[in-house]
Image (cartoon, grey):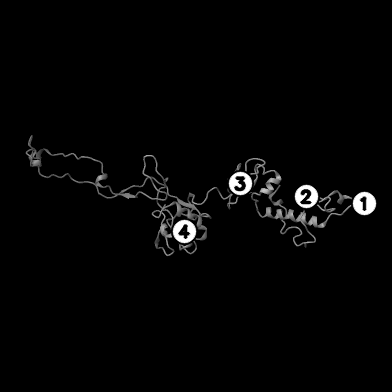
Amino acid sequence: MLASDIPQRFPIPFADAAGGGFIRPVPQASQIGIQAGAASLTDGFPPVCFDPVGAGGTPPFGQDMNGLLNQITQWSIWQAAGGVAGYDATFSTAIGGYPAGAVLASATFGFFWFSQVDNNTSNPDAGGANWAQGSFLGSLSTGDAKLSFKTVADPGWVLMNDGSIGNGSSGASTRANSDTVALFTLLYNNVVDTWAPIQTSVGGATTRAAQGSAAAAYAANCRLVLPRVLGRALAGAGAGSGLTSRALGSVAGEENHTLTIPEMPAHSHGLKLSPNQYAAGSPTSAGLDGGGSDTAGLIASTGGGGPHNNVQPTSFMNVMIKL
């Protein structure tokens, strides 16, 4: 079969404009004994519709035909438009549960549920068993980060460029749009003021304590400064064994460093004297008087005293964070 073999889509359901007297839903329960000739999902068109009218038969109802084709074409349109159904408890019970491999839309936008067993009646959106979650958008969610050589953020992401995020009235430098609310809330709650400061809409300093909550700060058009990553190595937050505890979003280290005296290793310098600076057993001419009257002496200095490069071999990439 070829991709070009796709049939023409229905632009509207069959009998879309049929009046009430010309269309009706086809019920599931049998209509035999209730209304002669009426169709049902159980019986279809009943046997009496196949008997000649002269022999007591009843013609099928046009309303049933319109109703049946209307429902079928509604589902055809939904599927042609890319629609995916979510979990339906009534439908699940009626069919005995979803089969293995069934795909349902999750209540969370962008995610789907995949049934792992046959006859699956559990509700995946309520933590039901034997469902696996996935997403055609990827499995990443708000606050996840990724490395990239791209210079423009993917849709639904922002570059971590040491800028700020907020709503459309926040004046944020990285992204000022209502789609930042989830990331704003996550960083507000998980990172402290020191590493992800809160600012007013004009860039003035404020704090989480002053704002009260992420929702209040966002509604007040505050900006949140993204944790700094430009030019920095990335490491895991927390307290590694034998290591200093590091807060989430914090930064440390310096690109260049000048050693201080306490940082220098303990060491000594040798002193070499030329023969004409002393007499055997009497080093007084070198300023080293064995009688306790030594005079000050200096060794020639060396080194520049400037900072040294502290950067390990590094490859630099851009970091994006999911909105």
Point out the frontmost of discs 1 and 2: 2
Closer to the chain start, of discs 1 and 3, is 1
Most foreground residue, 25 or 224: 25
Q: Give the CA separation, mark 3 to mark 2.
A: 29 Å
User: Dots 1 and 3: beta carbons under 8 Å?
Assistant: no
Which residue type does callout 2 highlight? Ala
Q: Amino acid at mark 4?
A: Ile
Q: Residue at x 68, y 46 (%)?
A: 92
> Residue 107: x percent and y percent?
60, 51
- Judged by depth in the image, the label closer to the viewer, 3 or 2, is 2
Dot 1 or dot 4: first in sequence order is: 1
**Upstream in sequence: badge 3 or badge 2:** 2
Say which residue label 2 marks: 29
> Which numbered mark, 4 or 2, is in the foreground of this view?
2
Numbered disc 2: secondary structure: loop
Residue 210 position within the rendered picture, expressed as x and y whole percent measured from the top left: 41, 60
For label 1, the crowd category at 10 Å Cα-Cα, with few meaning under 14, some 14 to 19 and many 20 or more, is few
Query: Can residue 151 be seen by looking at this rendering?
Result: no
Q: Is residue 280 left or right of residue 43?
A: left
**What residue is disc 3 on?**
124
Residue bearing the label numbered 1: 55
Separation (CA) of disc 1 from disc 3: 54 Å
**320 and 221: which one is in front?**
221
What label sits on residue 63 in the rendered view?
A: none
Q: Which mark is residue 165?
A: 4
Circle 2: is it few (<14), some (14-19), or many (20+) Cα within 10 Å? few
